[in-house]
Amino acid sequence: MERLALLGGTPAVNKQSDDSLFKWPIFTQEDEDAAMDVFRRNRFSGTEITEKFQEEFAKWQGREYAIAYCNGTMSLTAAMFAIGLGVGDEIICPTKTYWGSVSQAINFGASAVFCNINETLTMDPNDLERCITNKTKAIMVVHYFGYPCDMDPIMAIAKKHNLKVIEDLSHAQGGMYKGKKLGTFGDVAAMSLMSGKSFACGEMGMLVTDDRKLYERAMAFGHYERNNEKYITESDELKPYFHIALGGMKGRANQLCSAIGRVQLKYYDDRCKEIRKAMNYFWDITEDLPGIRAIRVDEKEGSNMAGWYIPHGLYVKEELNGLSVKRFCEALRAEGFVGAWDGGNFCLHTHPFFKTFDLFGMGMPTRIAFNERDVRLDDEHLKRSEEYECFSIPWFKHFDKEWIEIYAGALRKVVLNHEQLLESDLEKKQGGRWYGTENA
Ligand SMILES: *Cc1c(COP(=O)(O)O)cnc(C)c1O
């Protein structure tokens, strides 16, 4: 029996890999030159570079229009405004996601209604109709950790009930579902492009749509009615409001990020392809292990997970004598298995923000201030989503067979020797965090 490193044994990963194995984003001289050009010409503000990036991004995305924002949260807020989310409306969102997917709805007097996830950690289409009422305006689809949501049933339900669909593409730029690009299913898609994301260019967001009306509304929300000198607004509804951003908030991107984004876009698909090869290989050689399940799609159906943003596996503790995922990850990290964190995001319905927060000072939680019904708090029903446990695996940026096998070996070692950990697994706490990796 091999002694686990956490208990004094020798770590399975006992040499240093090349930095480039995990480094993201991949920046080259070309990115640096593009950034320095903005810097030297003092073009941080303005929109001429951003406009080029928008055009190129829209083309790459296969959508008519793209608008850049200062961050992903703002782009998703603009998407909500674009579809006309308003007082008393409900927007359905999977409970397991980053708060920036749906928290903004509160600013419109609208309520987030949470649906369950399934073993893919994305929206369970079978739980969608339960959430729909005559107040439901939209569905927020999140391709969580790069996994493409099951869009066929989701779109069918949206159509049947005449609901708008927003895709939160923050984890899955460039991913595919049955041969069609993610971000082209909903009425509008919006996403983060911040430096930790799959498509990463600093601190930025992007919104894409084919719908001229949604495009103009989204633009008016955070950008005035124009790209710099070029007025784009044609709609009579918006014309009286020229010169003031309708959200009362400015949401423009800075051009340093746009310049880097333009360079990143040129290489993004090829880099994702290599990541997919590496990540699939990692699962191919570990999937036989008990207690863990790959979260990945069958690429033969024309689906893929783009750049595998923060790849995770499902953790099935019943197969490992009830060992907590927290202890399991501690043991993995001790083996030198980088980035083994438990849980993903906590389920949003468990946060007081969605239960008691009174944004408008009305003396009552905003969630019931404009809406008598309280579907979003069905804690009992949503418990199922809390029960899926997961852990992150190394996010390889290159297909380096030798190193992937070393990390796979570390995982194998911990799984096969997990019994050593049972005695010291005192806390048995559930895994998860609100954001990042260490604020649980
Ligand atoms: C990061 C993220 C956002 C918010 O993007 P920011 O750029 O951080 O504002 C929204 N949704 C999801 C799913 C995210 O991961």
Image (cartoon, rainbow, N blue to C red):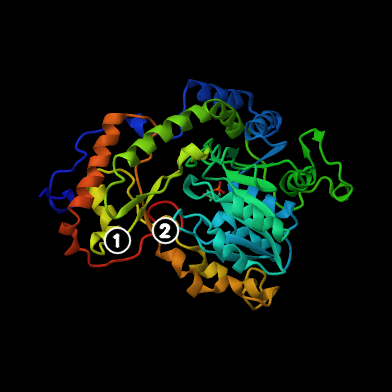
Q: Amino acid at mark 1?
A: Lys
The x, y position of residue 275, in whole percent, is 42, 34
Mark found first going from the N terminus, 1 or 2: 1
Observer-nearest residue: 160 or 362?
Answer: 160
What residue is pinned by disc 2?
A: 433
Q: Amino acid at mark 2?
A: Arg
Which of label 1 and label 2 is nearer to you?
1
Looking at the rendering, which quadrant does residue 87 occupy?
A: bottom right
Q: Residue furthest left?
A: 1
Density class for disc 1 (Cα within 10 Å; few <14, some 14-19, many ≥20) is some
Residue at 40 percent of width and 32 percent of height: 277
What residue is pinned by disc 1?
A: 317
Q: Seen in the image, is 111 located left or right of residue 241? A: left
Residue at 57 percent of width and 24 percent of height: 34
Cβ–Cβ under 8 Å for marks 1 and 2: no
The x, y position of residue 71, in whole percent, is 59, 45
Residue at 61 percent of width and 55 percent of height: 154
Q: Which element is circle 1 on?
A: helix
Density class for disc 2 (Cα within 10 Å; few <14, some 14-19, many ≥20) is some
Looking at the rendering, which quadrant does residue 10 occupy?
A: top left
| Distance in Å between CA atoms under marks 1 and 2 | 19 Å
Can residue 275 be seen here? yes
Q: Respond yes or no on whether mark 2 lies under 8 Å from ligand 1.
A: no
In the rendered image, the vertical position of residue 357 relative to residue 153, given as above or below: below
